[in-house]
Amino acid sequence: MSEAPVGNLNMLLVEEQTLLRKTVSLTARSLGLGTVHEAASMQAAERMLGERAFHGAVISIDCGADENCHYNLALLDKVRNGLSASAATIPIAVMVDQATADLMRELRERHVNRVILKPFRAKILLEAFESFGTVAAQKQAT
Amino acid sequence: MLAAPIPAYDSERLAALRAMLILDTPPEERFDKVAQFAAQEFDVPIALISLIDENRQWFKARVGLDVCEMGRNASFCGHAILQPDIFVIHDARADERFADNPIVTGAPYVIFYAGAPLPMPSGYVIGTLCLIDHKPRTLDTTELAIFSSLRDLLVEELSNPAEAPHE
């Protein structure tokens, strides 16, 4: 993946709530945190991950009200197994409705950098993207 | 109390607001979502989309407030629409413009207020997106930027005359 100045980072946000997604994207731009590319669905994210290299991603795998749901970890696997246009080691934060021991183990195995629990706030997502910028800057410095 | 000032161009501003045919219309999900998002994001008990009519502020969307309108004279939003950007009162009890305002000393007990003006394509500000808390608050740089983005998205939505289908 090519190096980029911190303010020029391309990051991915996978989240179905339009208002949250757009607010984060607009605010990241206004704060100079980089460009947050929006994906409203896993399918859209999968396509975008194949087309462009990202410096980090925040991915919602929220199950909503479905108690028996299986979290979709396919996107994480795709990135971590080097099957996307991004480096396999990019920082990734995951948004989930609740943190079960099994899920945390699955996320640890996939080297997820941060877990964000409900209620999802734009400020928390922006902090995650900001930390990705710090990681990118550190990589450039070394 | 300093009453909300009436700008010299208020009749033109009111004409622009009334031409939108939005006053006294039923609630719309697209606007309710904005108020709900604001209340959750900023953890405030009250969030409003307030439109400033001639003698009243009327709420197109509201969280945490039972009434659909209040007098313009005592409104904070009446001040906010005259500001170039987000208008923040950290503690109304310590601000001589608002300390004896009846909505500070009584219900709904506006202690913290932040109002983002809503400028329409006409150039006139029709109202605000506002946050209210019953205790003193501050907004940091990131929160102000989020509030500004949310306002921009609301202005975009207000500029669309009909309710668009939702995903």
Image: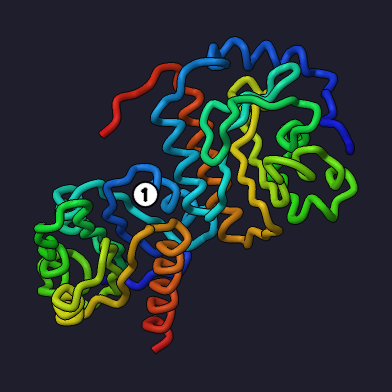
Seen from the viewer's position, the closer of residues B6 and B73 is B73
* Residue A20 rendering spot, x and y as whole percentages: 39, 49
Q: How is the image coloured?
A: rainbow
* Residue tagged 1: A21
Q: Furthest residue to the front? A: B106
Seen from the viewer's position, the closer of residues B69 and A8 is B69
> Horizontal placement of B109 versus A50: left or right?
right
Figure quadrant of the N terminus of chain A? bottom left
In this orientation, does residue B126 appear? no
Position of B165 relative to A115 (above/below): above
Q: Amino acid at mark 1?
A: Arg
Give the residue displayed 71% in from the left and 35% down from the top. Answer: B77
Figure quadrant of the C terminus of chain A? bottom left
* Residue B135 rendering spot, x and y as whole percentages: 68, 57
In this orientation, does residue A12 appear? yes
Give the residue displayed 44% in from the left and 77% down from the top. Answer: A134
Identify the image quadrant of residue B70.
top right
Give the residue displayed 53% in from the left and 38% down from the top. Answer: B152
Give the residue displayed 30% in from the left and 58% down from the top. Answer: A12
Seen from the viewer's position, the closer of residues A44 and B140 is B140
